[in-house]
Amino acid sequence: MQKVIDLRRDTITLPTEEMKRFAFQAPLGDSVYGEDPMQNELEALAASLLGKEASIFLPSGTMGNLIALLVHTNRGDEVILEENAHIRTSETGGIGAVAGLMVRAIRGEDGAPDPEDIRRAIRPKDIHYPRTRLICLENTHYRYGGIVPPLSKLQAIKKLAEEEGLRVHLDGARLFNASVYLGIPAKDIAACADTVMISLSKGLGAPVGSLLAGPRELIEEARRYRKMLGGGMRQTGWLCACGIVALSPGNIARLAEDHRNARLLAEKLVEIEGFEVDLSKVQTNFVLLYIRRRNLTAYRLAALLKEKGVLVTPVSETVVRFVTSKEVTREDILAAVDTVKRVLEYETKT
Ligand SMILES: *Cc1c(COP(=O)(O)O)cnc(C)c1O
């Protein structure tokens, strides 16, 4: 049977042998009572990597972002975020339904709104207006293809927030991809925010889990919300042990391999007639392919590739998303490109 080459997501990653060995001999305790040794160790490790006082282990990134919204705001407050932020587009409307917040969306195609646009969006003090409370950032930015917004821009936003008395939350589901891309420690990026969420279960390869890091007082409050939302798990040691391996320096550095594979894929795809890729935006482990061929939609291409064992995500009529991860080797990338060429040849003949 031919190997399926799965370029849909980096959440398909499976735990490494090292994770499994470390996990299954881990001591366990009831983490709701703070007695799971691995969870305590993971939370301390994440806090130190992110340069924050404390962190909390959570079942998902969505819960991490939602709890961040809850600890920073009161119901009816307004949150400023980039128009295509994951919190706005892909978290089931929890920002409105659960946190009870107003959303002020600003477009920023390099992955973050311009500080001046943010300044203009801040509500004046007036009894009629919601209170602007929080700015949410995202790095890497998912919908723009895993791009890394300029660090200087994020720093300017943090400065503005301090001047205006606003808080900043960073959705850093792929923060370590950004850190590897920029060649700087993750904490230098996390410094642009009061709280930061990271995912262990994407490129880093752990089976489950995210962390929310920030000031101790807010993380204590986050523990209450985790319980309220049903995220208080018990013997989490196996998962947290995987998380500790996921955050090891070697495992973080390995993300560079995914970035190299994405670049290789992009460079091969742009050589194909009627295919466009903005190579300047292939920065981490995503490739957005723009199809400029008559009679070929992204949906059709994805369906043809699927028949040949290559899985990709059509995100609109004309755009296909490819995501690299540790489950996909350099050889797989070259094989996937061959498959793309073969199905195109077949399409033009018939
Ligand atoms: C995946 C993702 C999340 C949510 O994480 P889940 O663990 O899937 O809930 C949040 N933000 C971004 C940018 C993501 O890619």
Image (tube, rainbow, N blue to C red):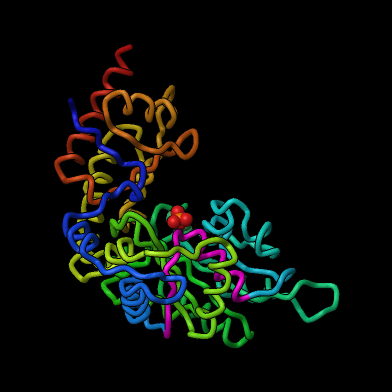
Rendered residue at 47%/40% (across/down): 315
Residue 54 falls inside the magenta stretch: yes
Query: Hey, which quadrant is residue 329 in on the image?
Result: top left
Seen at 57% across and 86% down, the residue is 162
**Residue at point 59% right, 57% down?**
88
- Observer able to see residue 186: no
The x, y position of residue 223, in whole percent, is: 52, 74
Task: Decide if residue 257 is on the left or right side of residue 54.
Answer: left
Residue 171 x %, y %: 47, 66
Looking at the image, residue 334 lies above or below residue 157: above
Q: Is residue 284 magenta?
A: no
Q: Quadrant of residue 189?
A: bottom left
* Residue 301 visible in rendering: yes
Indicate whether 44 appears above or below 182: below
Where does the image place residue 207, in percent across and percent down from the top left?
Answer: 32, 54
Question: Please, is residue 343 above or below residue 152 in the view?
Answer: above
Q: Of 129 and 94, which appears nearest the observer?
A: 94
- For the N terminus, give its image quadrant: top left
Instruction: Label the magenta part by its dominant secondary structure.
Output: helix
Residue located 85% across and 73% down the image: 128
Quadrant of ligand 1: it is bottom left
